[in-house]
Amino acid sequence: MEGIIDQVANIQGMTAIAVSILIGMGAMGTAIGFGILGGKFLEGAARQPDLAPMLQVKMFIVAGLLDAVSMIGVGIALFFTFANPFAEAVKTLAAG
Amino acid sequence: MAVEHEAPETVTGYIVHHLTNLRVGEGFWTLNLDTLFWSITLAVIISWFFYKAACNASEDTPRGWQSFVEMLLEFVNDQVTSTFHGSSRLIAPLALTIFCWVFAMNFMDLIPVDLIPAIAGGIGIKYMKVVPSTDMNATFAMSITVFILILFYNIKIKGVHFFTEICTVPFGKALFPVNIIFRLIEEFAKPVSLALRLFGNLYAGELIFILLALFTLDHTITSLVSSVGPVVMFVSQVLLALAWAIFHILIITLQAFIFMMLTIVYLSMAHESH
């Protein structure tokens, strides 16, 4: 019986580390991307101020694209936090 | 809000309860009844609003709601005409529908987390998730529909050339297996990324609202006035939830706009060659 608790605790500890890597690296990539994107937008707007509204719209579009994969990572990370399939597999193997 | 407790609620139990859909059936054929109900209800509500605006449309004196609808239509029309350089009667209404529907579904996230589930629990419905776009079924349904439209327009406009293009672009005729793999990945990345982008953003937003609701999980009105601890938790909950809700207003509008823009861009790419 204690063996199962050890195994599940092991999986949960690994899952916690995996979740933090998922969210952290996604956040890092997105932050760097947004920084570069915003900087280029400011440069372009400073160069041609009358194009600034159009550039802003395009900036939001690219911002949405940048956000996408890190949000996918957040979704998967939260899924692993709350409904961990690996722990479920061990539990069903132990019960069956 | 004092609700019936079968047992003292744990933190994890509360979170899992709020993340569970109202399901019917098993396996592949589970229907998430709450997603279906709320998405159809919101679609009916939006359609009714637009219908009222169209019915009472007066050309000389546009009043409040009609001028808002006109503003919205002009906005979507500008986006479509600046991106899509063909002629199609489908794309602009599709873009308007996507924008309004996704925005309405996302907007349900701003309603307090426990409000509608508590009312539903009073009626006897055990689980209720009110935000359809936090359900992967809803977002994938929309993006698969867009994908089918992309394929339809590709085949309709380009005909057989579409299939030869899959084999010959971008590397040339000799490397056609590589071309096929690249094109397939590119085509399938579109609906997958559309659906998961919307899902991920809204799921994370809803989860943070649920986590903020945990601050005052077991407290009632009387315990709030009895000691300092609950008051501090309540005030911090209100402030943090306010800040997150204001940021979330930007997110829901942005995600609806991006879904619409990417639909327009993908459909316009289906009308032109690579």
Image (cartoon, rainbow, N blue to C red):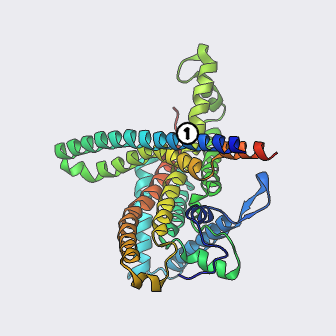
Report which quarter residue B238 is drawn in.
Answer: bottom left
> Which of the chains bears the disc numbered 1?
A
Q: Nearer the viewer, residue B21 or B97?
A: B21
Secondary structure, mark 1, is: helix
Residue at 42 percent of width and 54 percent of height: B79
What is the three-letter code of the residue carrying label 1? Met
Examine the rendered structure and indicate whether residue A86 appears above or below residue B173: below
Examine the rendered structure and indicate whether residue B115 appears above or below residue B268: below
Residue B48 image point, x, y percent: 57, 77
Residue B8 image point, x, y percent: 61, 72
Q: Nearer the viewer, residue B35 or B212?
A: B212
Count of picture labels: 1
Q: Residue furthest front?
A: A2
Examine the rendered structure and indicate whether residue B185 appears above or below residue B20: above
Q: Nearer the viewer, residue B160 or B44?
A: B44
Residue at 48 percent of width and 48 percent of height: A71
Q: Residue furthest top?
A: B174
* Residue B48 in view (yes/no): no
Please state if B102 lies on the left or on the right of B243 as rendered.
right
Report which quarter residue B65 is drawn in.
Answer: bottom left
Residue placed under numbered mark 1 in the picture? A14
Residue B217 image point, x, y percent: 51, 72
Label 1 Cα crowd, 10 Å radius (few <14 / some 14-19 / many 20+): few
Residue B216 image point, x, y percent: 47, 73
* Residue B1 in view (yes/no): yes
Q: Residue furthest right?
A: A96
Residue at 39 percent of width and 71 percent of height: B233
Please state if B246 lies on the left or on the right of A68 as rendered.
left
